[in-house]
Image: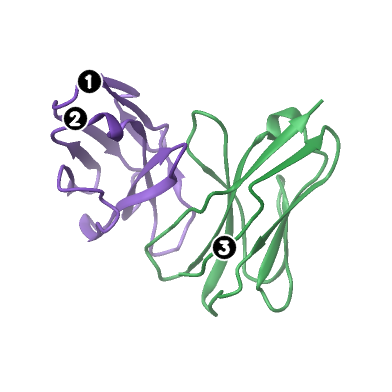
C-alpha cells in the first residue's frame, strides 16, 4: 500500500483558495488517488478521485502531475463550513484495504 | 437509500461489560469496513468483509474484539469484556468493491467505557 504524506494542519481565511498537497512517492500503476473530508462528529465523506492530470467537480479540483508522486486538492473560495480534516488516500482498483492517514486539519477563519 | 446505518449512536458502559455495535450497509454494497477513531491514533481500520467474508482482521486490537457479518445487510462488532481504553468512535463503512466505488460512512457510535 502506497504511503501518503500531507501537512498536519493549515489555516486559511474565508474566500481564499486552499491547496493541500499530498505526497505518495510509492504509488503503483493501478492506484487511484482519493480525497475524503471529515467534519467533527461525522464519518469521512468522499470529495474527489483521480488517476492523472486534472479532475474537477462541484466541490473541488484535483491536480495530479505526470509522475503521479503527489497530488493537490484545491478548494476554491473556502468558507467557515469547509473547516474539517481532509484525507488523501491511495489504493488500487482491485484492492480491499482502505487505509486513512492522519489527514490535514484545515481551519478557516473569518 | 438511507445510507449506512449504525446503532447505537452513543453507548456508555462500565468496564467488563459486553458491548455490541451494529451496522446496516447500503443495499447492493458488497464490502463492509469497521474503523475506530481516537484523537491519539486517528482513524484505524479494524476489519473488512467482502461478500460477507472477513478478508483481513489484522487491525483488530485484541481477542476481546470480534466482528461478524451473517448476511449482506447486517454486521456487528463486539467487545467482550470492554475496557476504558476502548473508548472511541467506531465507524462502519460500505462500498461496492466490484466497481471500486467510494466509501460511504455511517454516523458512528460514540463508545465510552467507564
Measured as percent of width and height from the top left, residue A84 is found at 63, 36
Measured as percent of width and height from the top left, residue A75 is found at 76, 46
Quadrant housing residue A76: top right
**What residue is drawn where x is 64% and y is 56%?**
A6
Measured as percent of width and height from the top left, residue A88 is found at 58, 56
Circle 3 sits in a helix, a strand or a loop, which is it?
Answer: loop
Residue B97 to residue A107: above or below: below
Q: Give the colour in which the image draws chain B.
A: purple
**What residue is drawn where x is 58% and y is 48%?**
A103
Quarter of the image containing the N terminus of chain A? Answer: bottom left
Badge 3 density bin: few <14, some 14–19, many ≥20, Cα 10 Å? many
Estimate the spatial distance between the alpha carbons at disc 2 and disc 3, rounded to whole Å: 34 Å
Task: Specify whether B41 is left or right of A9.
Answer: left
Q: Residue B13 has which mark?
A: 1
Residue B61 to residue A33: above or below: above
Q: Give the colour in which the image draws chain A.
A: green
Estimate the spatial distance between the alpha carbons at disc 1 and disc 2, rounded to whole Å: 8 Å
Between residue A56 and residue A34, name the one nearer to us.
A34
**What residue is drawn where x is 61% and y is 73%?**
A25
Circle 2 sits in a helix, a strand or a loop, which is it?
Answer: strand
Residue annotated with mark 3: A4
Quadrant housing residue A66: bottom right
- Same chain for mark 1 and mark 3? The answer is no
Amino acid at each position: 500500500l502506497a504511503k501518503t504524506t500531507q501537512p498536519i494542519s493549515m489555516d486559511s481565511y474565508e474566500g481564499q483558495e486552499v491547496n493541500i498537497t499530498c505526497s505518495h512517492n510509492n504509488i503503483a500503476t493501478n492506484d487511484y488517488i482519493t480525497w475524503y473530508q471529515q467534519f467533527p462528529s461525522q464519518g469521512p465523506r468522499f470529495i474527489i478521485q483521480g488517476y492523472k492530470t486534472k479532475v474537477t467537480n462541484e466541490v473541488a479540483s484535483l491536480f495530479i502531475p505526470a509522475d503521479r508522486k503527489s497530488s493537490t486538492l484545491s478548494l476554491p473560495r473556502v468558507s467557515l463550513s469547509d473547516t474539517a480534516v481532509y484525507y488523501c488516500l491511495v489504493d488500487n482498483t482491485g484492492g480491499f484495504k482502505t487505509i486513512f492517514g492522519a489527514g490535514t486539519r484545515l481551519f478557516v477563519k473569518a | 437509500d438511507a445510507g449506512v446505518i449504525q446503532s447505537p449512536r452513543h453507548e456508555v458502559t462500565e468496564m467488563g461489560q459486553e458491548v455490541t455495535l451494529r451496522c446496516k450497509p447500503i443495499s447492493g454494497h458488497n464490502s463492509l469496513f469497521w474503523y475506530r477513531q481516537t484523537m491519539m491514533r486517528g482513524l484505524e481500520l479494524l476489519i473488512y468483509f467482502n461478500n460477507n467474508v472477513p478478508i483481513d482482521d489484522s487491525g483488530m486490537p485484541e481477542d476481546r474484539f470480534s466482528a461478524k457479518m451473517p448476511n449482506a445487510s447486517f454486521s456487528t462488532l463486539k467487545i467482550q469484556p470492554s475496557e476504558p481504553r476502548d473508548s472511541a468512535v467506531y465507524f462502519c463503512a460500505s462500498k461496492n468493491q466490484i466497481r471500486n466505488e467510494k466509501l460511504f460512512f455511517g454516523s458512528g457510535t460514540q463508545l465510552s467505557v467507564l
